[in-house]
Image (spheres, grey):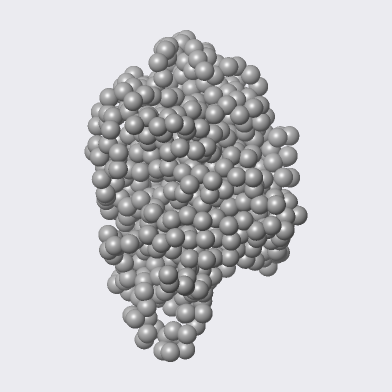
């Protein structure tokens, strides 16, 4: 039995390469090693040791408190190989319990890392060893599932190289971890949002804007006021308290990823932000999307894409000019951005585009776009190319809408006959009367940017789906909340009111439809599984572990449950903390 290889520190390897000839030697290195600007400690092997502790993290010259992995934010890049086994020894030096969830990895549920669901957690002073086979490849990440440690820096990327040939060849790669960092403690942020709705929204509409004819008419504003909704409330936490980071660096730091003109550069992008959805573009370069959530897709070329919290995308860019390019990750509410530079040499920079005009919520975001519903039959999430069973749960009644149109007429927003499993209460502000499948849309604020933006419907799995059976049954789950009181849940219930797991049989085939009754996008993550979004050619539907559900929208996916207890939650950390968390309890065997 061969002895396990010792951990490899990529920085040590690169220092040796530079000492031996630098760029002249770069052609002899693997593609991942030709990324000297990355600055991420890299660990590999079959035995890896991680230490969770406190440290200070400096952004733009200001130091703040962080929870770190091996002393850094983000933590080390873990690089593994499909087919190997790995043992990850995690030591907790905090004064509170901690944990690590291997986001997107298919592991035994006891190794999934969710305290109170799949294991007890890691107590102060203790070491817990995660051990599992690596049965996949792609771009993933890992983070705490304890309290609000993740927003404080407890996150890091993971790359798993395929056992066989790389289906999308490249010459160089860079890992870019997007995040949001605040010098305000996350528990303070949470308390302030509970106390005052929209407390961090400094982009509200003004009287001056009304007089100038911007945004909305007076009649429209009065209608929104009657519904106690704010069309500018796009993000709960904004650039007013967040600095947006790439690999732990703020936009003024000019974090740089090197390339040589003509190289195919793979950008492995992880959105590790607590509360921020980003819009990504590189002005002057096309983005070829080759993977989503670690799963290979048929290449699709776009100019921009939206990445939800916890999603990963792999892009290939091919800069042919000997000049710098700006990588822009703009917050969805346009209150700030993260920025990096792609350049042939260190010290270069390119123009950073100004923030674009902030988006506004629409009637469609409230699930009340009657014209679109009438013209498209409600945007059924079943899809004509998918399997037959209905996406909606049985017993659904048609929505009750009063008046001939939306604006200027009363609408029965709290129509609980539309969602019989949802009960009225302080945690349910509204029910979307006419939710639509919005997977063919580019995301809030990107509808008219003048160039091509990726949509979920552009994604087609490169490899055949492992399970192509038609669903045995259908389940609808409503995403509910009250933005003013900052209460969030599933089907009108938050997790602290008592767990109410969704139950499944191992091996059955289930179609789940997520219906967003709120005016905020929710990135929904299912642990321990990939699911197939119900569109695209049957057998090649895109596989995801996290999906953005647009406001007033719905998303249908098929999945095959694996035995165990699996967390299911919104990956907006404060939404999950406020109750948007549940468990998929899988028992028995349906086969």
Depth check, front residue: 81 or 270: 81
Q: Is residue 214 visible?
A: no
103 in relation to 8, above or below: above
Q: Is residue 313 above or below residue 216?
A: below
Q: Residue at x 29, y 43 (%)?
A: 465
| Residue 391 horizontal/vertical position (percent) | 36, 24
Residue 291 placed where, x, y %?
35, 53
What quarter of the picture does the N terminus occupy? Answer: bottom left
Farthest-out residue, right = 95
In which quadrant of the rendered view does residue 85 lie? bottom left
Q: Residue furthest bottom?
A: 20
For this rendering, which residue is in front, 60 or 100? 100
Q: Quadrant of residue 59?
A: bottom right
Q: Quadrant of residue 405?
A: top left
Look at the image and tell me in which quarter the C terminus lies. top left
Q: Is residue 266 above or below residue 3?
A: above
x and y percent of residue 147 in the render? 67, 45
Q: Nearer the viewer, residue 321 or 317?
A: 317
Q: Residue at x 54, y 34 (%)?
A: 583
């Amino acid at each position: 039995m061969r002895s396990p290889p010792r951990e490899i520190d990529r920085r040590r390897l690169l220092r040796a390469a530079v000492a031996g000839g630098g760029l002249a030697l770069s052609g002899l290195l693997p593609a991942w090693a030709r990324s000297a600007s990355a600055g991420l400690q890299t660990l590999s092997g079959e035995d890896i040791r991680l230490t969770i502790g406190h440290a200070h993290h400096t952004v733009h010259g200001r130091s703040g408190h962080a929870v770190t992995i091996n002393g850094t934010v983000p933590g080390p890049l873990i690089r593994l190989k499909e087919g190997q086994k790995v043992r990850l020894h995690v030591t907790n030096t905090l004064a509170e319990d901690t944990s690590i969830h291997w986001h997107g990895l298919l592991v035994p549920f006891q190794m999934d890392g969710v305290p109170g669901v799949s294991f007890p957690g890691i107590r102060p002073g203790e070491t817990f060893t995660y051990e599992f086979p690596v049965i996949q490849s792609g771009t993933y990440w890992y983070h705490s599932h304890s309290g609000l440690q993740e927003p404080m820096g407890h996150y890091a990327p993971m790359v798993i190289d395929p056992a066989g040939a790389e289906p999308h060849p490249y010459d160089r790669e860079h890992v870019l971890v997007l995040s949001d960092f605040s010098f305000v403690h996350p528990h303070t942020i949470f308390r302030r949002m509970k106390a005052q709705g929209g407390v961090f929204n400094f982009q509200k509409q003004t009287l001056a804007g009304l007089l100038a004819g911007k945004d909305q008419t007076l009649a429209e504003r009065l209608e929104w006021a009657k519904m106690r909704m704010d069309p500018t409330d796009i993000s709960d936490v904004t650039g007013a308290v967040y600095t947006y980071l790439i690999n732990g660096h703020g936009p003024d730091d000019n974090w740089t990823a090197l390339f040589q003109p003509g190289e195919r550069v793979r950008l492995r992008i992880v959105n590790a932000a607590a509360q921020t959805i980003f819009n990504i573009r590189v002005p002057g370069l096309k983005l070829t999307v080759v993977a989503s959530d670690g799963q290979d897709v048929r290449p699709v070329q776009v100019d921009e894409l939206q990445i939800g919290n916890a999603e990963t995308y792999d892009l290939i860019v091919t800069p042919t000019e000997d000049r710098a390019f700006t990588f822009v990750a703009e917050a969805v509410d346009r209150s700030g951005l993260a920025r990096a530079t792609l350049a042939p040499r260190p010290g270069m920079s390119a123009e950073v585009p100004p923030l674009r005009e902030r988006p506004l919520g629409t009637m469609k975001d409230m699930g009340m776009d009657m014209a679109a519903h009438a013209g498209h039959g409600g945007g059924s999430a079943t899809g004509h190319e998918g399997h037959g069973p209905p996406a909606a749960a049985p017993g659904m009644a048609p929505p009750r809408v009063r008046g001939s149109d939306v604006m200027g007429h009363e609408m029965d927003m709290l129509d609980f006959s539309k969602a019989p499993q949802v009960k009225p209460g302080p945690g349910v502000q509204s029910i979307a009367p006419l939710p639509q499948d919005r997977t063919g849309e580019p995301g809030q604020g990107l509808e008219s940017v003048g160039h091509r933006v990726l949509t979920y419907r552009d994604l087609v799995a490169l490899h055949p789906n492992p399970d192509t059976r038609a669903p045995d049954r259908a389940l609808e789950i409503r995403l509910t909340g009250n933005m003013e009181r900052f209460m969030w849940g599933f089907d009108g219930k938050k997790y602290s009111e008592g767990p109410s797991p969704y139950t499944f049989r191992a091996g059955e085939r289930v179609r789940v439809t997520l219906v967003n009754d709120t005016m905020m996008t929710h990135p929904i993550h299912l642990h321990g599984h990939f699911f197939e979004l119900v569109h695209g050619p049957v057998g090649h539907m895109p596989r995801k572990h996290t999906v953005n559900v647009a406001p007033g929208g719905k998303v249908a996916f098929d999945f095959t449950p694996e035995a165990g207890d699996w967390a299911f939650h919104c990956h907006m950390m404060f939404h999950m903390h406020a109750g948007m968390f549940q468990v998929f309890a899988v028992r028995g065997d349906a086969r």
